[in-house]
Each structure stands twice: as structure tokens, then as C-alpha cells.
Image (tube, grey):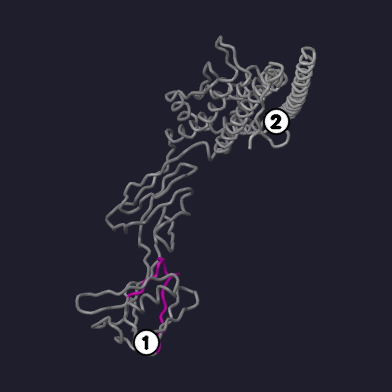
Amino acid sequence: MPTINFTGLSTGIDSAAIIDQLVELERAPAKLLEQRVSDLRSQLSIVGDLVSKLQGLRDAVKQLDTASEVRAYSATSSNEDRVSITSASPTAAGTYNIRVDALAAAETSGSTAFASKDPGVVGTGSVTIAVGSNPGVTVNYDATDSLDDIAARINDQVDGVRASVLYDGSNYRLLVSSEDTGTANALTFTESGSALGFSELVAARDAQFSINGVTVTRSSNTVADVIDGVTFELRGVTPATEGDTVVDVDFDVDATRDRVQEFVDAYNAVANLISGQLSYNGVQRGRDTLFGDSTLRQLQAALGATVTTGYAHGSGTTSLGLLGIELTETGALQIDAAKFDKAVADDPTALDHLFAGDGGDGVAAVLDGLVDDYTRAGDGMLIAKQDSINSRIDAFDSQIERIEDRASRLGDRLSRQFSQLEALSSTLQTQSSYLAALALG
């Protein structure tokens, strides 16, 4: 059962209210510290967000730290019916004349014709199927098996082939096809017992084509190792009366600008966060922000210097501004598309040297090093700030715990003292009543 205290019955003093007020006075410093801890946790969250955005900036610049990554190229085919581009991330421009002489094919072999596909149509026997130079796999069957049963067993036991039953309107055939094209995946059948009588229907064949006059043979119609960074599909043989298919790999200004925009977006995420913390608009900033923080000011200055300085380019220098990547009043970057497009079209190597460097560090390497200075585990400047804030929170939490303990002990002590006072008052009142009664005696 809960304990019920009736205070002030003898003295008329509301001791509970007095105790509560005194305990709250004792706890007052803890409330101030709790607010400070709340402010520090807000700062810690801001620092963590900044670290995350800096790491995002590092990821973005790492996509631009080599010349082959800075510029984007696109590939087009003059005749998609002969050669189609399936994926392209080339690293250099070029023109390729392609003539398709033969398409790769996968072998298909079929059994003899059967009037039915029902159980018993074949009898008992086995077929060993080998794909290319791989060891053969033996599939057994008997008079209880239908053609569908044998096909299912081949599919289950033999890797690299597909088996099915074909009905041509009069008879049934068991077909087995290689899953991959090319002569290296030709099929070999060895039969015993009641034979299925496999024979070749479509021969395995390699693709053959010429590119800029050089004859090339591949096992697949999908070719990914001839033009650097380009995968294309051979789709049709070039007739003798038709010209070559031309695959052009050209510098893609729009795609290049998109790559740089990803860097700009990552940079602005950092710059806007810092600017938002350090800017003053006439309203007093709370202690839960990093307003006036020296580490942020130092980082802001370093970032600004990195994106406004010149970088080696041939016998001179280049800069973000010269290429249309401009610094705004808020410290963010923006791309002047027209200026950027003209600058990189006129001198694409300037973009390479700006980000990847020309005999020295470019923007990518400088920013990567700067981010490392601030986010490196152990001694990065922002990591050290996080550690410092956490240490202060721990210290304040310890102080709060001691104050709460002291206030609790004060409350207990006052409760005992007021209880003793009530008991003494009650005794005195009893004695007074007794003496008064004797006097009236």
C-alpha cells in the first residue's frame, strides 16, 4: 500500500510544500546543466551531419580524380539493325567502321521424330551430353518415361543446355539447345540402348566481324572488349551491297556537365550547412548552434580557397570560374551552363587538369585531402570536436547526477526533521493540555 503523509497536523506548517521548494532550489543548477546538455547534443548532431556531407563531397570528387573520369563520352551507331549500343562509358573519342560477316549461334540438336510423346515411346537407354570441352553428363531413361520426362531430367541434370519437346503438327521431337553461343559451346551426344537419335539442327557458330578493317571473332554477339568502355550487340549480317555500320564515340558536353553538377551539389550541401550555422541575421543565435565556431570558420575559408584558386594547365592555369563554375555570395557554387559548355568544348583538357591535375594536385585531390583533415578517424578536426562535445556531455551528466543525488538526500533529511518537529510539537501540546487540566483540578 502507498504511504500517505499528513503534514502540519500539530504545527500547522505545510512541510511538504516547504520541502519541495527547497529541493527544487537545490536542483536548480541541474536544470541549467540539462539545458546545456541539450544544446551540446544539438551541436553534436550538426557536427555529425557536417561529417556525413563532407564524406559525400569526398565520394563526389573521387569520381573526378582522373582525366578519364572527368569527361563523359557517348556512343552512337549509324545502323541499329546491324550493330546496337547496349551500354557505353567510353573514355576517349573515336570512329569505328564495323562490318558483320556472321552472327554467333547456339547449337540446337533434335531427336528422331516420334508419333507420340507418351511413356514407352522411346524405351530404355541413356544419352551422355557434353557442352564444349566439359565432361559429359549421362541421363538415363526407361519405358515408363515420356519425352517430357526425359526433357525435364536433362534440364535438371545437365548444366548449360535447355531441353524441350517440339510438336510440328505431325510428330514430336526432343530438342536440346546450348544456352551459350559459339563453337566453344557445341554439343556432343553419346547414346546407348534405345536411342533418341540426336542430330544437329542448328550448328554452333562464332560471330565474325571486321572493325576498321581488322577481322575479329567472338563466341557471343554481345561484344564488350573491342571498343574501350562500349558494349555493343551484333544484330544482323551486313549485306554485300551495304556499307559499314559506323560507331561514333564523341565527347558529350551535357553528360560531362551532369558529372560536374554532382560535385557542385555535394559541395553546396557542405557550404550551405556551414553558412547556415555561421550566418547572422540580427536574431540572437542559440547555444544549440555552432554560430561563431572557429573550426567551421576555418573549414569555410579552406573550402573557399580551394574552389577559387588557380590550377596548373599547360604553361598557365585554369580555375572553376574560368570554366563557368562560379562562387555565389553565400559560398555555394553554381554552373553557368553556356559558359561551361563553350569552355570545355574549346579546351576539354582544361577541365581534366582542373579536377585531375596537370603535374600536380587538382581540385579533386585537394578537396579529398581537406576532407580527410577534418573527418579522419582519431585526429580529424571535426572528429576531435565530436570527442570534445561528448566529453563535456559526460562531465555535465556526472554533475547532474551528483546534484540530483544531493537534492534527493536533502529531501529525505528535511522530511525526517519535519517529522521530528511534528512529533515534538504533538508531545508539547499533550503535556500542555495535561498541565492545564491539573491547574483547573
The three-letter amino acid code for the residue at tag 1 is Asp
For the record, the magenta segment spans 175-192
- Mark nearest the camera among 1 and 2 is 2
Chain-order first, disc 1 or disc 2: 1
- What residue did someone put label 2 on? 390
Residue 67 location in percent, x, y?
55, 38
Q: Considering the numbered disc 1 on the image, is that residue within a helix, a strand or a loop?
A: loop
The answer to whether residue 103 of the structure is visible from this angle is yes
Above or below: residue 221 compared with residue 163: above
Left or right: 2 as drawn, with respect to 233: right
Residue at which label 1 appears: 142
Instruction: Answer left or right for 40 relative to 344.
Output: right
Does residue 195 sit above or below 291 in this rendering?
Answer: below
Going 37% across and 89% down the picture, which residue do you hit?
Answer: 124
User: Residue 225: x and y, percent?
Assistant: 48, 54
Q: Is residue 180 magenta?
A: yes
Residue reaching furthest to the bottom: 193
Q: Amino acid at mark 2?
A: Asn
